[in-house]
Amino acid sequence: MAVAIAVTRERREGETRCAVTPETVKKLLALGAAVTVEAGTGTGSSFSDAEYEAAGATVTGDLAAVLAGADILLKVRGPTASETSALKTGAIVVAMLDAHREKATLEALRGANATAFAMEFVPRITRAQVMDVLSSQANLAGYRAVIEAAYAYGRGFPMMMTAAGTVAAAKVFVMGAGVAGLQAIATARRLGGVVTATDVRPAAKEQVESLGAKFVAVEDEEFKAAETSGGYAKQMSPEYQAKQAELTANHIIKQDVVITTALIPGRPAPKLVTAEHVASMKAGSVIVDLAVEAGGNVDGSKPDEIVTTANGVKIVGWSNLAGRIAADASALYARNLASFVGLMVKDGEISVDLEDEILKAAVVTHKGAVVHEGIKG
């Protein structure tokens, strides 16, 4: 009997993405799996039930029927309690579980004896690049952040010379030059903005400058050692943060658009833009906080709101920016998942090798226990 893979529609508020597309249904079938999709799964990403059926999936509106026989459940966000309770004992769940914060979801998965994999924990190694959901989704979030900024700004991004006079180019400051930040830089440059950027990782300087932006940072000895072996930014000392804050204060007052992208795995997002910074900006300026779901990089940002301050600065706090470009985000995420499933399903059989470095890094619950070292307890 073929491995049964189930995909249900996302039930978390505001989630428009989906875990499989008609394209990846075919990839999963090629592994020897049978795919069952809950009706309406692709609606938010513009994929119809008919397209899933044409690709070879079974589509049904009966959630219990989708989950009852599932060997593997694929999701974007973690399953809800009703979904987890409907799974058979020992099923495999693969999703972006937000494992550091969604403790109730992990407890439910542990209680269901599920083997759950958090896609955000896939290691950043060459072999796993095709499974790197953080990169695929952050790339689109960075792009969308600039589009949202341009919409909220209400002025042009490029310099335009007309018979009636010259329109100045927007000055754009990107804080954090990871995947999202670099895409934001590239997009802002394509729109004609004058772009500067900052990051605490030394390797980011060359990347920023290669995109035609100017790098802004306190480049002391701490800065030179501010990157983990996995390529993430380290938590900086209070002394460094104070020096960087002073530099930021002097720079941000001149900016039209600020986009913040700084995240530290397992910790609240660092505060990069203070109330004083915001108060120093001119009316009509825009700040987009990509880290709003993790507590925010910006004082005053609120999830899923545009806050207009007393001095006329707009702080954009849309959660799930990748979900605002859902068709492409789903296409990339679904390919990430299909590659990950390929580690466990071969010729219609499930074989989960938890000594495989990718699976070992991503597994969070197994045999009724939370097994990931980073989130135990």
Image: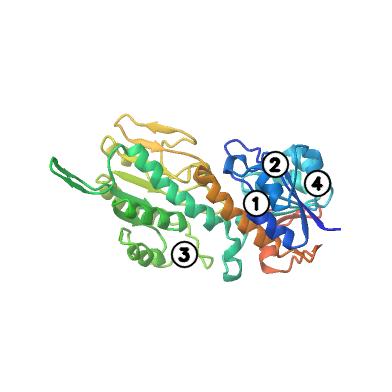
Task: Looking at the image, tell me whether mark 4 or mark 3 is earlier in sequence order.
Answer: 4
| Amino acid marked by disc 4 | Ala
Residue topped by disc 2: 104
| Residue 200, horizontal then vertical, whole percent | 40, 59
Dot 2 or dot 3: first in sequence order is 2
The residue at the point 62 percent across, 54 percent down is: 334
Number of marks drawn:
4
Give the residue at mark 3.
227
* Badge 3 amino acid: Glu
Element type at marker 2?
A: helix
In x, y percent, where is residue 165?
A: 13, 42
Q: Earlier in the sequence, mark 4 or mark 2?
A: 2
CA distance separating discs 1 and 2? 31 Å
* Separation of marks 1 and 4 at Cα, in angstroms: 29 Å
* Residue annotated with mark 1: 22
Q: Earlier in the sequence, mark 1 or mark 4?
A: 1
Foreground mark, 1 or 4, reads 1
Label whose residue precedes the other's in the sequence (1 or 3): 1
Q: Mark 1 and mark 3: span between their CA atoms?
A: 39 Å
Q: Which residue is mark 4?
A: 112
Circle 2 Cα neighbour tier, 10 Å, few/some/many (<14 / 14–19 / ≥20): few
Q: Residue 46: percent from the left, percent from the top?
A: 58, 43
Q: Which is in the foreground here, disc 1 or disc 3?
A: 1
Kindly identify the amino acid type of the residue bearing the numbered disc 2: Ala
Specify whether 156 is left or right of 240: left
Seen at 68% across and 60% down, the residue is 27
Q: Tell which of 150 and 118 is nearer to you.
A: 150
Q: How is the image coloured?
A: rainbow
State how far apart marks 2 and 3 are (Cα).
Answer: 31 Å
